[in-house]
Image (cartoon, rainbow, N blue to C red):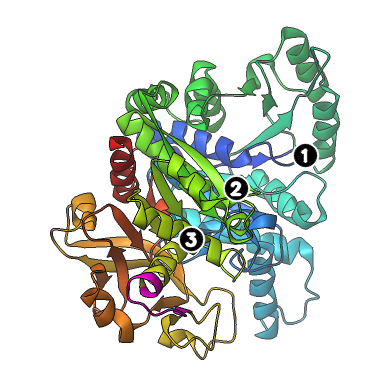
């Protein structure tokens, strides 16, 4: 009988719900990933899920200036950048169903209503929408055989768009083993830590019928005793359930900091998890290397969304992963391509860098500035890495300046160009809807031997994630190769150019987004070889 009860407890999913307070930008994604990492280190299967209240089905059509990077999963789902954080910490690949949006939920409820599944009922937020949310989460937990589901609730407490989701989580907690974690901000004024924002936020959460049993305090330094006692007293939480989340040198250090505070022991006790030691030995070694680099290289990233770092977060993290394994720190300088295009920045300033990277993007703005940067890298033999659009513009630059096709361009920027060396994928030509219709997710690539790509991957077949509508025009491939451009990677049917290189110097670009597959414990090979090449200079 005891064995049966233990088996039932062990394999019955538990839930951790992470809610914010009265302000955003505190790092709920990092907290969710860190908690997931700690539980995973105990040997449990952890499933991170995130809810975003916006009515978009996904964030694929959002401007990076407003929402930050669009992260793409292996199955092609375009989702919030926090999913990149989850994957980078857990060294796993998640499914699209882990991303829940208001748009997805309402679409599902309205479809059911139109099919007559609610006949006789007036469809309401409670119970129909809240029930749909709970069924989604529980069915996903069962299909993935998750031991612990960690749910991040996007936005702040009090937002209209996530109120119904919080109600669904309250209802879930009445039936399932659930722990609520409140992430709050503790500001410091004139050297004194202020707890009133946390107290007010906690009361607001309590008014929704939710009582957080753990409070994580985001602050510039560890909590002082007086502040901790006030939070404990006015938020009805034991001292030992209040934890520090202070400023760190690297976000990857947070699991270690929480482990030192016995966070995992408290979670294990509240969720009836067996108590074992969290094994973070390898993680700690990688973090120490990030904190103590042995060498630095200067890389210029010529992009068009440089005013917001979140637009390129996966690229920044991919370089951190290389640092963790090589000790080589990348000093990544963001340069606005529009400034080069308009002459506000002299392209010759790029000579001060050991490498140049051109990332992905959409739209005509800043394109000529990126092309000038690519030309400068090629002519001055500066190591170059291009990602997605960075490949397309590498081809445009080569066609113009080496193949002498003066007005060569992409039809994305000039529909009437005489030499459309980059054109729309055939399957994209009749598409009307924008959301979720690009060439998305994992695709195979065949790599030629004796190339930079093969040196990086050490394999003739790889898989990377994609997000694009345009490709290298097949009609120009022969001319490009005759003029010396190396086509080192193609799709499995040889129809799509996947990787191109310059001869006799380090210059490589890929149609894929290799930054999306990079993880702390497994850096992406292209970033690894690029940094090592830059370090030689």
* Residue under numbered circle 3: 372
Image quarter in which the C terminus is found: top left
> Residue at the location (57% across, 28% down)?
270
Q: Give yes or no for residue 408 being in the magenta stretch.
A: yes
Mark 1 residue crowding within 10 angstroms, few (<14) / some (14–19) / many (20+): some
CB under 8 Å between callouts 2 and 3? no
The image shows residue 3, relative to residue 315, as above or below, that is: above
Badge 3, how many Cα within 10 Å: few under 14, some, many 20+? some
Mark linked to residue 23: 1
Is the C-beta separation of discs 1 and 2 under 8 Å?
no
Q: Is residue 334 left or right of residue 279?
A: right
Q: Are marks 3 and 1 in contact (CB under 8 Å)?
A: no
Left of 225 or right of it: where is 11? left
Q: Which residue is mark 2?
A: 310
Comparing labels 1 and 2, the label whose residue is closer to the camera: 2
* Residue at x 35% of width, y 47% of height: 527
Q: Main secondary structure of the magenta part?
A: loop
Q: CA distance from mark 1 to mark 2?
A: 18 Å
What's the residue at 63%, 39% (across, down)? 28
Q: Position of residue 305 (x, y in %)?
A: 61, 55
Q: From which residue to which does the magenta span run?
A: 399-409
Q: Dot 1 lies on which element?
A: loop
Query: Which of the 4 quarters of the picture holds residue 124?
Result: bottom right
Image position, residue 160 (x, y; %)? 82, 55
Mark 2 or mark 3, which is nearer to you?
A: 3
């Amino acid at each position: 009988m005891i064995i049966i009860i233990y088996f039932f407890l062990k394999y019955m999913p538990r839930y951790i719900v992470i809610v914010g307070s009265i302000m955003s930008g505190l790092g709920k994604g990092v907290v969710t990933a860190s908690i997931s990492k700690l539980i995973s280190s105990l040997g449990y299967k952890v499933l991170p899920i995130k809810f975003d209240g916006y009515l978009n089905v996904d964030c694929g059509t959002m401007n990076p200036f407003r929402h930050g990077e669009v992260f793409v999963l292996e199955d092609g789902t375009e989702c919030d950048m926090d999913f990149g954080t989850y994957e980078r910490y857990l060294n796993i690949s998640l499914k699209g169903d882990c991303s829940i949006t208001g748009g997805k939920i309402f679409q599902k409820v309205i479809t059911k209503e139109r099919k007559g599944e609610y006949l006789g009922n007036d469809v309401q937020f409670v119970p129909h929408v809240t029930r749909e949310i709970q069924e989604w989460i529980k069915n996903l937990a069962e299909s993935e055989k998750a031991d612990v589901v960690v749910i991040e609730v996007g936005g702040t407490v009090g937002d209209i768009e996530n109120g119904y989701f919080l109600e669904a989580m309250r209802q879930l907690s009445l039936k399932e083993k659930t722990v609520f974690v409140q992430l709050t901000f503790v500001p410091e004024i004139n050297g004194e830590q202020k707890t009133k924002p946390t107290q007010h936020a906690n009361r607001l959460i309590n008014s929704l019928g939710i009582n957080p049993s753990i409070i994580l305090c985001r602050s510039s330094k560890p909590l002082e005793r007086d502040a901790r006692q006030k939070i404990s007293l006015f938020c009805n939480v034991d001292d030992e359930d209040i934890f520090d989340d202070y400023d760190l040198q690297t976000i990857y250090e947070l699991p270690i900091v929480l482990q030192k505070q016995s966070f995992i022991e408290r979670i294990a006790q509240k969720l009836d998890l067996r108590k074992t030691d969290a094994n973070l030995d390898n993680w700690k070694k990688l973090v120490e290397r990030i904190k103590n680099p042995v060498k630095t290289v200067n890389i210029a990233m010529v992009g068009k969304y440089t005013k917001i770092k979140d637009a390129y977060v996966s690229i920044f993290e991919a370089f951190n992963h290389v640092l963790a394994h090589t000790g080589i720190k990348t000093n990544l300088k963001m340069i606005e391509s529009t400034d080069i295009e308009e002459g506000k920045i002299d392209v010759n300033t790029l000579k001060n860098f050991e490498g140049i990277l051109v990332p992905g993007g959409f739209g005509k703005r800043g394109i000529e500035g990126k092309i000038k940067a690519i030309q400068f890298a090629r002519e001055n033999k500066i190591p170059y890495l291009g990602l997605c659009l960075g490949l397309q513009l590498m081809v445009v630059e080569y066609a113009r300046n080496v193949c002498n096709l003066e007005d060569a361009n992409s039809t994305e920027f000039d529909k009437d160009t005489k030499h459309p060396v980059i054109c729309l994928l055939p399957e994209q030509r009749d598409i009307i809807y924008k959301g979720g219709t690009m060439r998305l997710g994992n695709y195979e690539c065949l790599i030629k031997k004796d190339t930079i790509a093969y040196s990086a991957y050490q394999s003739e077949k790889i898989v990377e994630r994609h997000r694009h509508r345009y490709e290298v025009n097949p009609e120009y491939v022969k001319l490009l190769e005759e003029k010396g451009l190396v086509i080192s990677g193609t799709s499995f049917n040889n129809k799509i150019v996947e990787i191109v290189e310059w001869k006799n110097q380090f210059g490589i670009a890929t149609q894929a987004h290799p930054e999306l597959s990079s993880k702390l414990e497994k850096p992406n090979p292209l970033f690894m070889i690029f940094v090592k090449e830059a370090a030689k200079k």
